[in-house]
Amino acid sequence: MKKNLNMDVIAKGLGAERRGNVSATGGFFGAMQLMADIQARFRVPGGGGRPTDPQWTERRLVPLAPETLTLLEEITANVRKHGGVNVEPMQLAALLLEKTTRELSEERVEQIVRQRRARR
């Protein structure tokens, strides 16, 4: 059984100060974070079947370019091979969509909208 780590105690023991969360966005550390998210969130449903996030209750069709689907398939193949977690391309797409949506601040969205208006 894994114990939860108390980051405040760890920081104090190292003589450090906690200043907030840091998230990896790409490369090796981003891939490791993605694996950790998949392992933490995906559960096998009670009746059996493919592991999924139990909080996902909405089903929608999401159009993709063929190149995007190919990339998602390649990433999930690597996740299965190296992480031992069975994840499907569209499950990965949903997870990435949720993470990106949470990371977009209201201020950043307003900045994007202003930039688009300025280009018109």
Image (tube, rainbow, N blue to C red):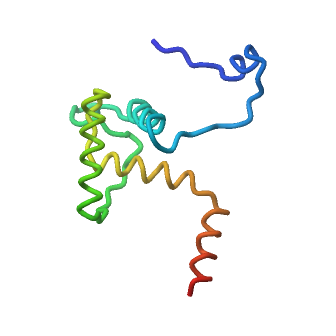
**Residue at image location 51% in from the left, 55% down from the top:** 101
Label total for image: 0
Relative to 12, say whether 27 is above or below. Answer: below
Relative to 23, say whether 46 is above or below. Answer: above
Provide residue 57's location: percent of width, then percent of height: 37, 49
Dividing the picture into quadrants, the one containing residue 48 is top left
Q: Is residue 115 left or right of residue 20?
A: left
**Residue at image location 23% in from the left, 62% down from the top:** 66
Provide residue 84's location: percent of width, then percent of height: 28, 27
Q: Residue furthest front?
A: 27
Q: Is residue 100 left or right of residue 82?
A: right
Residue nearest the observer in this picture, 29 or 95: 29
Q: Residue furthest bottom?
A: 120
**Residue at image location 55% in from the left, 51% down from the top:** 102
Q: Quadrant of the N terminus?
A: top left
Residue nearest the observer in this picture, 97 or 117: 117
Dividing the picture into quadrants, the one containing residue 52 is top left
Dividing the picture into quadrants, the one containing residue 53 is top left
Q: Is residue 91 left or right of residue 36?
A: left
Provide residue 91's location: percent of width, then percent of height: 32, 46
Provide residue 31's location: percent of width, then percent of height: 42, 37
Relative to 54, say whether 59 is above or below. Answer: below
Q: Quadrant of the C terminus?
A: bottom right
Q: Is residue 114 left or right of residue 80?
A: right
